[in-house]
Image: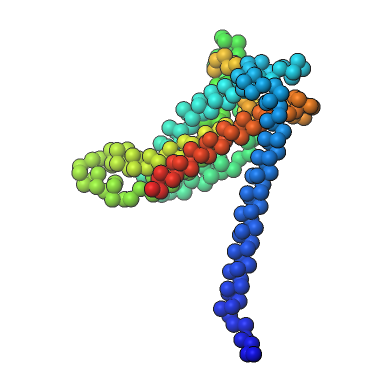
Amino acid sequence: MVVRPFERKDFVKLKEQVMKLVFLLAACNSIAAVALICVFLFTNGVPAMVEIGFFNFILGQKWKPSNEIFGILPMIAGSIWVTLGAMVIGVPTGIFTAVFLARFSPKWLYRLLKPAIDLLAGIPSVIYGFFGLVVLVPMIRNIFEDSGTTGDTMLTAILMLGMMILPTVINVSEAAIRAVPESYYEGALALGATKERSVFFAVLPAAKSGLLAAAILGVGRAIGETMAVMMIAGNQARMPAGLLKGIRTLTSNIVLEIGYAADLHREALVATGVVLFVFILIINLLFSLVTRREKS
């Protein structure tokens, strides 16, 4: 029997097989982590929903753990209103900034703005919270002094979240705009359109799927934010009563009470996490549908 010497191509093939196994293990770890989180949430949260009553839990307007009343509708409404408000502020601002960066910005200014936007994405949320606490809260309190507001309001949280989602919206929108073939822009110019009309009526409609994906990712960023919102939103577990009143979001509700909660109270907080998880799941499904439609 003749034994073939171990050649270089065999070594390369072995190396590829090993790396393929490493990647497979990494993917399996990621899937296992998601599966474990799902199992933990649903096994601890669903029994609490059943004990409290699903509709009492989801549609209940009172959250009084000391009386074993667990209704999270105020927190759901607070999360939705704050997220929608942040989208109204952050999405148009982010898209217009992306248009400027991709089509109108001089190169020297782009080299200054782009790192600044990337830096904005890397700032920890607690720093945003400090900024909101020191700058935005007094500003809102002074502007609306006649209303008697303390400044820890829904409006403050909306302004803060609108600022926090900007890097996500800008970066995804800019990538979508740059992905539009240049022939769209040049074709509009050839038909006599100005530079501005070519960008807004030829390039932007072609990039609408990417812009929608940017908005959806912004929603995900806003609804999952905890620390900054907790520091400036007032944290009042009641139905939203206006922009100048305090609110509590789903994430804040969990963080504020999980440290001392026990028994059914603790399980109700985990069930709150289940509701938040379902929200995030829906957002990710929407994002997948949009990106799949863009590819097709």
Q: Nearer the viewer, residue 173 or 224?
A: 224
Residue at x 44% of width, y 41% of height = 290
From the viewer's perspective, is residue 128 above or below residue 143? below
Residue 17: x and y, percent? 60, 68
Q: Nearer the viewer, residue 29 or 117?
A: 29
From the viewer's perspective, is residue 231 above or below residue 212? above
Residue 131: x and y, percent? 62, 30
Q: Quadrant of residue 238?
A: top right
Residue at x 31% of width, y 50% of height = 182
Residue 61: x and y, percent? 63, 16
Q: Is residue 295 visible?
A: yes
Q: Residue furthest left?
A: 191
For residue 145, side relative to residue 185 (left or right)? right
Marks counted in the figure total 0
Residue 163: x and y, percent? 53, 32
Q: Residue furthest bottom?
A: 1
Picture quarter with the N terminus? bottom right
For residue 259, side relative to residue 274 (left or right)? right
Residue at x 61% of width, y 54% of height = 27
Q: Quadrant of residue 234?
A: top right
Residue at x 75% of width, y 15% of height = 67
Q: Is residue 135 visible?
A: no
